[in-house]
Image: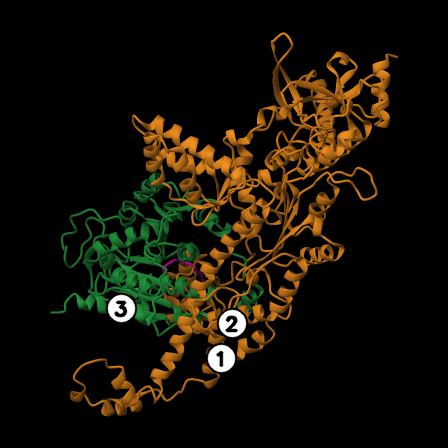
Chain colours: A orange, B green
């Protein structure tokens, strides 16, 4: 065996470098080859930084989107191109400043960056000034960094609660107004309300002396209804008012009200404790709202409703009632998720509380405490566990994809039960200075931290609830990207490179020992791409070594071999991704098995049909028109068997014209739907029956045969009755 | 929105009403009059939908049919000739929580009240309108109405009327914002009730023309259609009314008609040989005027007083 190959295989199996031709990669600033185009993100226009919009249709907008909206308005006409160029230069300046840690709102960042750019450039100053006048959407600008999940989800949650508070305030103000009106009306109708003093006070300004309020009072008191308003009702209405006006779940305009509760927490334990403490107040408020609604509609009945409301909320509050109140928000970091805290998190999710939990992870390839590689297990298990509970809204995503998932985030915040947002910030300390956006996007590409949502409100099956659509090339094991470079002869070469877990791990300085750089002079055909090694089921024949294509700090292509531990981890990562794919309906094994058996059955049927087609046709194929026509006709109910001698009315066809019932209201009567039937056939003569049939506007009375053979003129009556048989 | 458990419990305690709870007095209509059939269908609707009598209003104009509110044990407003619509619109505007019905006759609606009718269609407020169309002025003892067929002999047209009848369906379908147009006949109670029910559930102005017999003044007006079920054309569709087995058995002339198809609705409305029965047009997406004008501002005593003062201040000398 070739000495190089021996050394490579030894490294592959043991992770030890036994040859001077195997170089450690520490300090070489190597990056996965596909990262070559993303060295300076500030020169790219992409989703970040984001603007957390204070007021607007969307809670969050990318800076580039807002700039485009401004350009749509101002970059027109002859100087449109010039304005566009200047404003895009400003955008780049803002992006650079934010990447360096400057914070502020869109407008303040604009105002800080613009003067420096336009210092000696009048045209640019003019462009920026015109564009600035169109800056209408403002808010904090935030880059993809460690604080993004906290701020973005906190902002979206706060906006959701503000909207809920507006609706709540509208409802409460209406109820308070109507309940106050009830109290006022009771007073106005009381003797005190009709007193001369009160009448005078309500008269406003004017010639008071020419009007006798005492006389008016006497007349009103005398003429008023004797029935006094029930004291119990007055008391109830006053109690309801007190509860509605003293609530602390939403801010109120009342100066005397206590400060509203806070609903944002940094620990599950604190949120759970607050929820429990406030539950009686929440029940009291929900009860007051339900009672007040009845009261203002004038539908509250003490006999019926007192007992019902006495036991109100004994089983807690249901979804619809909870939806009136604010949701809780808990934001925690996975590193601070102790055993006790995790047990509280489980409790929140399991008992269906309206609490939204954001768990931020900054490291998805941490080593397990016992020294084994167990990438992404800690962060993944949370989302999987929450999905197992089945009633929890779950969203997992790197922070870099949160903007893309903004609609799903909103669905989670609007969901009536608990929601778990598991977010990888990308701010891993050992990522060799790569920006968090790039690390987050790489985690998504490499399937280390796939993005998905599980929305229980979307339907009852997995197909409706589970969505993997945000992942690139979700139907593949690893996404393939085009990679172009120049070879030694300056010829352009393009190839498809997959982005795997190994590429992702190669960015992390903690795991550099698992990689060895192969000097260019030792490159040979035994160095095979990692995807080839990953495609093999096991160790294989050991005549080649998996190798990764990377670039150094000067964008030169390098080859790095990988040890077997990482290959094993990559297979494990792929297997986890494959499970998610199945849940998402991609390469679903049940469906594929069913499809195979159906295909087999279909082929057998086809074979049998072609065999019988060889024989002469036996029977013509039935026309399809007839069954279609038959299907359109409404089914006809079997008709009740009736004796031709019996007198009856087709009650359902009666048009309530009163003819028959006025003719003989003992023989004919109306049923519960005010339609006629024969109540007592013996309550009149056969002659009356026949005459009623003749007078019936819709001819639905059937006289049948006479019951009294001695009735005079029967022969003629029977003849007349034949028309109505 | 999901109903809370409390709502469900409250529903359990909702009052159940009987037909008698909506009946008031004995109608003075002639024996055999089609108004009775409409009254019964509407009373059944009130009972089945458990409409609270104190939250239900019937508004009418003048004529036989306009006596309708007197026979309902609910709120009612027996208005002035041709003005049922403006009154009903005012009620709905001020009290959108009330269920408002309008009962009007062919003279009341299509003659003196025609202008109000046209604009009520355009406003599309959530009203359920029944046009009791017996093709004659009955209360004043037989004068030709706008819907009297050409040649109708009456006290005002002793040699027969000279003009073609106005078609209330075609007119309604020609006005902007028409959202529900249906036709029923009083002598098919099942179909009448189903149409009344659909009209009630429609959010917007539902216009139901009910062809009804006047046994006193035009006793044979609908005789050809009553005697020949094939001259009644029942409209049905999956998005509209479905026909029961009983109806299908008697009325075999059936037409599948999509209620969103306005052009076809206009064709059907123009039928003369057959009487189409069912929903000709229904569009649930047309905005209701009372909702369009809803400002969301709470009408407190203070805001009303402020608005009132502002108006009066305009006339301060």
Q: Residue at x 45, y 36 (%)?
A: A65
Q: Quadrant of residue A589?
A: top right
Q: Which one is in front, B53 or A463? A: A463
Q: Is residue A509 above or below residue A140?
A: above
Pointer 1 and pointer 2 on the same chain: yes
Disc number placed over residue A236 in the picture, else none: 1
Instruction: Identify the secondary structure beneath mark 1.
Output: helix
Segment tinted magenta in the rendering: A697-702
Name the residue located 17 percent from the left edge and 47 percent from the top edge: B163
Q: Which residue is mark 3?
A: B306
Residue under label 2, please give it: A288
**Local crowd at mark 1 within 10 Å, few (<14), some, or many (≥20)?**
some
A627 sits left or right of B283 in the view: right
Q: Which x, y percent locates residue A354? A: 60, 58
Counting residues from the start of the chain, the first of labels 1 and 2 encountered is 1
Magenta: main secondary structure: loop
Q: Nearer the viewer, residue A163 or A373?
A: A373
Q: Chain of mark 3?
A: B
Question: How far from the left and from the top, in percent, is residue A231?
Answer: 46, 85
Please say whether residue A610 is one of the residues in the magenta stretch: no
Q: Is residue A686 left or right of residue A121?
A: right
């Amino acid at each position: 065996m070739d000495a190089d190959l021996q050394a490579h295989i030894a490294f592959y199996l043991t992770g030890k470098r036994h040859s001077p031709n195997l170089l450690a990669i520490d300090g070489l600033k190597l990056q996965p080859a596909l990262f070559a185009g993303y060295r300076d993100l500030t020169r790219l226009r992409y989703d970040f930084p984001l603007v957390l919009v204070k007021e607007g249709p969307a809670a969050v907008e990318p800076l580039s989107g807002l700039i485009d909206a401004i350009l749509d308005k101002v970059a027109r006409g002859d100087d449109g191109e010039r304005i566009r160029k200047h404003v895009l230069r400003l955008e780049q300046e803002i992006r650079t400043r934010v990447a360096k840690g400057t914070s502020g709102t869109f407008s303040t960042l604009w105002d800080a960056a613009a003067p420096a750019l336009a210092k000696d450039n009048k045209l640019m100053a003019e462009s920026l000034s015109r564009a600035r006048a169109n800056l209408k959407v403002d808010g904090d600008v935030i880059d993809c960094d460690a604080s993004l999940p906290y701020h973005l989800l906190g902002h979206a949650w706060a906006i959701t609660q503000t909207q809920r508070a507006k609706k709540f305030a509208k409802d409460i103000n209406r109820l308070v107004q109507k309940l106050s009106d009830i109290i006022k009306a009771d007073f106005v109708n009381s003797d005190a309300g009709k007193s001369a003093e009160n009448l005078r006070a309500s008269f406003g300004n004017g010639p008071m002396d020419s009007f006798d309020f005492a006389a008016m009072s006497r007349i009103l008191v005398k003429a008023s209804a004797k029935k006094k308003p029930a004291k119990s009702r007055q008391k109830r209405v006053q109690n309801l008012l007190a509860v509605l006006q003293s609530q602390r779940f939403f801010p109120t305009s009342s100066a005397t009200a206590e400060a509203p509760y806070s609903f944002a927490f940094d620990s599950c334990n604190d949120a759970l404790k607050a929820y429990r403490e406030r539950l009686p107040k929440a029940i009291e408020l929900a009860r007051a709202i339900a009672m007040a609604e009845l009261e203002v509609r004038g539908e509250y009945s003490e006999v019926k409703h007192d007992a019902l409301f006495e036991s109100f909320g004994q089983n807690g509050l249901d979804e619809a009632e909870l939806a009136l109140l604010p949701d809780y928000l808990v934001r925690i970091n996975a590193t601070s998720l102790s055993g006790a805290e995790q047990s509280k998190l489980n409790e929140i999710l399991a008992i269906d509380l309206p609490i939204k939990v954001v768990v931020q992870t900054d490291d998805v390839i941490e080593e397990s405490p016992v020294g084994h590689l167990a990438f992404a297990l800690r962060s993944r298990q949370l989302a999987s566990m929450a999905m197992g509970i089945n009633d929890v809204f779950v969203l997992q995503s790197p922070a870099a994809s949160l903007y893309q998932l903004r609609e799903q985030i909103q669905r989670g915040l609007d969901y009536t039960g608990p929601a778990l947002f598991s977010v990888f910030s990308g701010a891993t300390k050992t990522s060799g200075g790569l920006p968090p956006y790039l690390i987050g996007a790489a985690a998504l590409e490499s399937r280390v931290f796939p993005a998905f949502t599980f929305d229980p409100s979307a339907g009852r099956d997995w197909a409706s609830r589970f969505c993997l659509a945000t992942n690139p090339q979700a139907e593949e094991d690893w996404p393939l990207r085009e990679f172009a470079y120049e070879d030694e002869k300056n010829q352009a070469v393009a190839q498809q490179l997959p982005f795997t877990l190994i590429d992702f791990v190669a960015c992390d300085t903690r795991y550099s020992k698992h990689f060895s750089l192969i000097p260019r002079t030792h490159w040979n055909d035994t160095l095979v791409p990692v995807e080839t090694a990953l495609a093999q089921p096991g160790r294989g024949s050991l005549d080649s070594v998996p190798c990764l294509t990377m670039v150094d700090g000067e964008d030169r292509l390098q080859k790095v071999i990988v040890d077997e531990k990482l290959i094993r981890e990559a297979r494990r990562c792929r297997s986890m991704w494959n499970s998610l794919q199945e849940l998402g309906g991609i390469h679903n094994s049940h469906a594929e098995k069913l499809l195979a058996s159906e295909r087999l059955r279909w082929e057998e049927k086809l074979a049998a049909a072609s065999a019988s087609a060889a024989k002469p046709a036996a029977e013509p194929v039935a026309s399809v028109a007839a069954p279609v026509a038959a299907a359109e006709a409404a089914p006809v109910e079997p008709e009740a068997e009736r004796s031709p001698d019996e007198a009856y009315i087709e009650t359902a066809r009666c048009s309530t014209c009163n003819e028959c019932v006025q003719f003989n209201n003992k023989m004919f009567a109306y049923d519960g739907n005010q339609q006629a039937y024969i109540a007592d056939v013996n309550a009149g003569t056969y002659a009356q029956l026949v005459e009623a049939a003749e007078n019936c506007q819709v001819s639905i009375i059937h006289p049948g045969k006479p019951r009294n053979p001695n009735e005079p003129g029967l022969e003629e009556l029977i003849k007349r009755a034949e028309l109505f048989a | 929105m999901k109903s809370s458990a409390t709502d469900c419990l409250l529903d359990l305690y909702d009052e159940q009403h009987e037909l008698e709870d909506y009946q008031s007095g004995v109608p003075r209509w002639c024996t055999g009059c089609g108004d009775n059939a409409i009254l019964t269908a509407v009373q059944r609707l009130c009972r089945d939908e458990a409409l609270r009598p104190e939250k239900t209003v019937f508004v009418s104009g003048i004529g036989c049919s306009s006596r309708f509110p007197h026979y309902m044990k609910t709120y009612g407003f027996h208005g002035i000739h041709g003005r049922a619509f403006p009154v009903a619109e005012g009620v709905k505007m001020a009290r959108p929580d009330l269920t408002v019905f309008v009962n009007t006759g062919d003279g009341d609606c299509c003659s003196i009240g025609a202008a109000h009718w046209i604009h009520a269609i355009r406003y599309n407020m959530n009203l359920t309108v029944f046009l009791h169309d017996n093709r004659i002025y009955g209360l004043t003892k037989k004068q030709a109405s706008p819907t009297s067929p050409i040649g109708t002999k009456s006290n005002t047209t002793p040699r027969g009327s000279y003009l073609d009848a106005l078609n209330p369906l075609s007119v309604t379908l020609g006005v902007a914002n028409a959202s529900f147009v249906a036709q029923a006949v009083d002598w098919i109670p099942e179909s009448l009730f189903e149409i009344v029910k659909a009209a009630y559930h429609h959010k917007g102005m539902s216009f139901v023309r009910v062809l009804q017999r006047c046994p006193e003044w035009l006793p044979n007006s609908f005789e050809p259609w009553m005697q020949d079920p094939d001259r009644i054309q029942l409209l049905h569709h999956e998005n509209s009314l479905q026909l029961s087995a009983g109806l299908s058995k008697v009325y075999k002339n059936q037409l599948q008609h999509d209620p969103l198809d306005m052009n076809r609705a206009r064709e059907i409305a123009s039928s003369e040989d057959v009487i189409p029965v069912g929903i000709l047009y229904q569009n649930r997406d047309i905005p209701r005027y009372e909702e369009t004008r809803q400002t969301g501002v709470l009408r407190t005593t203070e805001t009303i007083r402020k608005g009132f003062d502002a108006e009066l201040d305009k006339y301060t000398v």
